[in-house]
Amino acid sequence: MKRLQLFFVLLCVALTAPAQVVYEQISSEILGADRQLKIQLPRNYEKNAEKQYPLILIFDGDYLYEPVAGNVDYFSYWEDMPEAVVVGVIQNDRDTDSYYEDVNFLPAEGGAAFMDFIGAELLPMLEDKFRLAPFKMAVGHDLTANFISFDLLREDRMFQAYMALSPDYSPRMQERLLNIIPTIEKPVFYYLATGGSDISALREDILPFHQELKAMNNDHFTYYFDDFEGATHYSLAARAIPTALERLFAMYRPISKKEFKEEMLASTDSPYDYLTKKYETVYKLFQLENKIRVNDFNAAYAAIEKKEDWASLELLGKLARKTYPETMLGNYYLAYYHEQVGEPKRALKEYQNAFLLQEISFLTKDMMLERGDKIKADFGYR
């Protein structure tokens, strides 16, 4: 098992090769010291000059950066999550950076300074230097998993998502989180993980807290938890990171066969409404304006055919023509719509117009000719 985990981590490191890796140093007036950063930019970052990317900020970047960066590159390559800018903060003295005082158990001295450094210096520098979307995730392990949880207590949160790997919670942290969660009014994601062979004191603290967290009832708070069988305090990170990314960005993924059968077809919404709401939700959750995938257009088209919801097909065609104006996608949907509602002349015109546009997906110029010729033959058009 250990060899398999090591292989997986090395595979993730290898997968970072196609992405752009940058090493930066930031001089902090607040800390009175320089901090080293590891930065991975998405593939084709320079070519996509107008695109903005979520930020994933990794604490304990000296050992957590590579597995996170590798997984992000892998998942985003397959569109299972959005491409992201990944930044690891090197922490040579994590005890000082994570320090909290022993009266109110809130960040103090080095911990308070490090929190100010993140908000006042590091994030502004990254936002100025890179094209960042509003969505930001923090990743921490042990002490730093507790440290990122302090941000969740703030009204002006720096992050919208938190990956807390086997946190060493400070006294009163769980109580404070349980009090703040019902008041959250904007989307927040919180992922918590432990393992069967985790440090006993931490595990005994995490498990009852998980029971309380899963009982929380706030539509703006999305909670995920994993307890990895046999995983130690350190090996659980290699299993939790890909699982967390997969779960946190589940809504972002293209419509799968499972989603098509179990959700789109079963929904009381029309396939058109299901599609548009999916992308509206992605924007609401992640502040990402994504172009609707051709795969997802075709999934909606297939559902419309099964439901014979021709009114939705007209809407889908207009949306596809607006989204992919240089291709025949929208014209094809509209042509098929006009066929189904008994308007062959209009269908013929749409097929003819589609022939002049670029091929896409399963649609070809020969197909448009054949469809048009069939209408001519059936109705005696010339």
Image (cartoon, grey):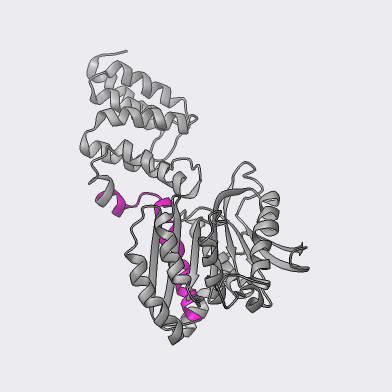
Task: Answer whether residue 365 is visible to the viewer in this image.
Answer: no
Question: Closest to the observer: 288 or 165?
Answer: 165
Does the segment drawn in magenta span residue 210? no
x, y percent for residue 62? 64, 74
Q: How many marks?
A: 0
Q: Which residues are magenta?
A: 234-261
- The image quadrant that residue 258 belongs to is bottom left
Quadrant of the frame with the N terminus: bottom left
Question: Closest to the observer: 311 or 29?
Answer: 29
Which residue corresponds to the image point at 51% horizontal and 61% vertical from the top-left? 152
x, y percent for residue 302? 29, 40
- The image quadrant that residue 354 belongs to is top left
Quadrant of the frame with the C terminus: top left
Does the segment drawn in magenta span residue 253? yes
Which residue corresponds to the image point at 57% horizontal and 50% vertical from the top-left? 53
Task: Answer whether residue 257 is visible to the viewer in this image.
Answer: yes
x, y percent for residue 356? 46, 25
- The image quadrant that residue 343 belongs to is top left
x, y percent for residue 3? 49, 84
Give the vertical position of 31 relative to 367 (above or below).
below
Which residue corresponds to the image point at 42% horizontal and 79% vertical from the top-left? 205
In this image, 99 relative to 164: left or right? right
Question: Closest to the observer: 167 or 369?
Answer: 167
Question: Closest to the observer: 37 or 316?
Answer: 37
Which residue corresponds to the image point at 51% horizontal and 45% vertical from the top-left? 288
Majority secondary structure of magenta residues: helix
Give the vertical position of 319 relative to 187 (above or below).
above
Give the vertical position of 350 relative to 62 (above or below).
above
